[in-house]
Structures are given as C-alpha cells and as structure tokens.
Amino acid sequence: MPDFPIRKTAVIVEDIFHDGGPPAKVPRRRAAALAVVENPFAGRYVEELQGAMDDLKPLGLRLTDRLIEALGGDIKAIDGYGKGAIVGSAGELEHGALWHVPGGYAMRERLGEAKAIVPSAKKVGAFGARIDVPIGHINAAYVRSHFDAMDVGVPDGPRPDEIVFALVMTCGPRVQNRMGGLRAEDISARDGLR
C-alpha cells in the first residue's frame, strides 16, 4: 500500500459580492481545500495504480470536512463542487487521476444527495503551478448559473516528487449569472443531468 505523506494543507475562502454589476444580496462563497502530498510513484513507471485510490480516501474526507467547515457547516447551502490535481514534474498525469474516486466520492458522501458528476482537471506542473478547478452544480450538470472555475495552487509546490490535490465547493450561483438555461430550483430528473 503506497503512502501519501502530507507536507501541508491550505484552505482558501472567497466571498464574492459583485462581478462588475450590482452587489448581490447574499455574496457567493467559494472555497478550496488543498493538500500537498508526497508522490510515491514519482520517478518511475508503475503499471498498477488503482489500488492507491483507496489509500487517498481518508484525505478526500479530511479535505471535504475542512471545506464544509470553511463554508459555514451547513451542507444544504453547498450547491457546487469540483476537484483537481497538479502532479510534480517527476510524476505523470495518471497520478493526478488517482484523485477521481477519493476526491469526488468524499464530497458526495458528505453532501448526501449529490447526483451530478464532479467536474475535474489535472495536469503535470512545475513548482508554483496553478490549476483552474472546474465547478458545476452538485445535482444537475446543466445548471448554467453554477458553471465556474477556481484558480488554486500553493506557492511552494508541487515539488517534483509531490502532488497537490484540491477540492472546491461553492454556495450559490455566480453573482451576476444571467445566461438562462435550467435553474437550480427547477431540477426535476434527479439523474445528475437535468
């Protein structure tokens, strides 16, 4: 079983009052939780990686819990999510894919009824690299008001033999959303799409 020792974690919280238009009655809250971990596969090719997803499940739950706390603790207020990974230069893109199950399912487990796919991004990046983590509504992928991304990273990582794993959650739509489409209050199919 591979080990992913944590070097550091960080939580970023944004309250967005306006985006050039009139101030929102309730600001949109957006938060990210990141962990910088050692990559046990750095510098070598390993055929079987899938088992390592189980080893990352506790980290997914830990970051999810930190996000829920940072967003005020009310899971009913959280309606957007996404995940991402930045793999250091001694690793490979597939090492970032290890985050699919532990990151996505941790948020779904804690949020309870989340139906939509968790948007995801990954890349191999140099020291100080950043990534735009895509965000979508937790119950319906076609809710346009929640299409977004949050730029995240840590200034001192990833080192070549590290991975930065990130989770993002939001409360509310974009503050000046006006692109129409399916509204969150009109979700009916409960199929993760509409």
Image: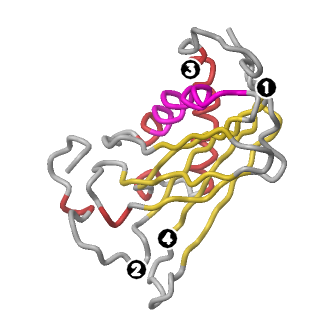
Badge 2 amino acid = Gln
Q: Residue furthest left?
A: 189
Circles 4 and 2: CB distance less than 8 Å?
no
Q: Secondary structure at mark 1?
A: loop
Work out whether mark 3 precedes mark 2 in sequence or the reverse, and give the earlier one. 3
Q: Which portion, as a residue range, is magenta?
A: 91-107
Amino acid type at image mark 3: Met
Residue beneath disc 3: 53
Residue under circle 2? 176
99 part of magenta stretch: yes
* 118 magenta-colored: no
- State the mark number for residue 28: 4
Label 4 CA crowd tier, 10 Å (few <14, some 14–19, many 20+): some
Mark 3: few/some/many CA within 10 Å (<14, 14-19, 20+): some
For image coordinates 65% across by 28% down, the residue present is 92
* Residue at the (40%, 55%) spot, across then down: 79
